[in-house]
Image: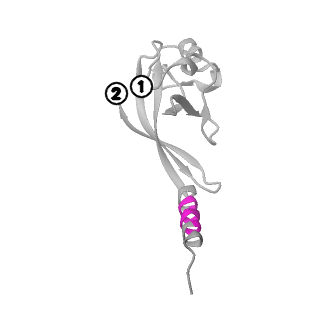
Amino acid sequence: MKRSRTITLTLLASATVLLTACGSDQATTRELYSSKEKCVEDWGSEDDCEVTANNRYHGPHYYWYGGRPYYFSRGGGDPKPVTTGRMATLREGGRSSNSIGSISSTVSRGGFGGSSSFHVGSGS
C-alpha cells in the first residue's frame, strides 16, 4: 500500500500552527519623552502615552515588521500598524527626534485567549 506524502505534510503544517498559537515572545522598544506633547506628536493619541515614575512619558511597545512599525495598545490584544503621528512616517530602524531615549523589552503573548504581559529587559 502506498502512503500519501500530502497527508503527512498537512499534519505537520497543522501541528506547527497549533504550537505557534500556544504563545510567543516579541522583542519590542518603547520611546521615552520629556513631555506628553512630544509623545502625542509621535503616536497621535494621548491613550498611547503613559507617564513614568519620574514624570516623563513613554509610548507603547512597538516593533518593526515589513518596513513599518507595529504597536501593542495599552488595553492588550494583537499588534496594530502605526497609522498616525510621526512614528507612522519613519522608515524601519528610524527614531523620532522627539524621543530622548528608548527601552528594549519583551511582550509575552499567550495563545488561545491567554493574557498578555510586559517584561522589561535592558535599556539603551
Identify the residue shown where x is 51% and y is 19%: 90
Residue holding disc 1: 102
Residue 66 coordinates in the image, percent (x, y): 52, 33
User: Is residue 21 part of the magenta span, yes or no?
Assistant: no
Front position in the image: 110 or 90: 90
| Left or right: where 106 falls relative to 40 | left
Label 1 element class: strand
Q: Which three-letter amino acid code belongs to the residue tagged 1? A: Ser
- Amino acid type shown at disc 2: Ser
Answer yes or no: is residue 73 visible: no
> What residue sits 61% from the left and 31% below the top?
81
Q: Quadrant of residue 5?
A: bottom right
Q: Is residue 113 above or below residue 30?
A: below
Quarter holding the N terminus is: bottom right
State the image coordinates of residue 75 (x, y, percent, origin top left): 64, 37
Part of the protein shown in magenta:
10-18
Colouring used for the render: one colour
Q: Nearer the viewer, residue 71 or 33?
A: 71
For the residues labelled 2 and 1, say whether their Cβ atoms are less than 8 Å apart. yes
Q: Secondary structure at mark 2?
A: loop
Residue 40 visible to an observer of this rendering: yes
Residue at x 41%, y 16% (from the top left corner): 100
Extreme residue in the front direction: 2
* Residue annotated with mark 2: 124
Q: Nearer the viewer, residue 103 or 20?
A: 20
**Residue 15 place in picture, x, y as percent:** 55, 65
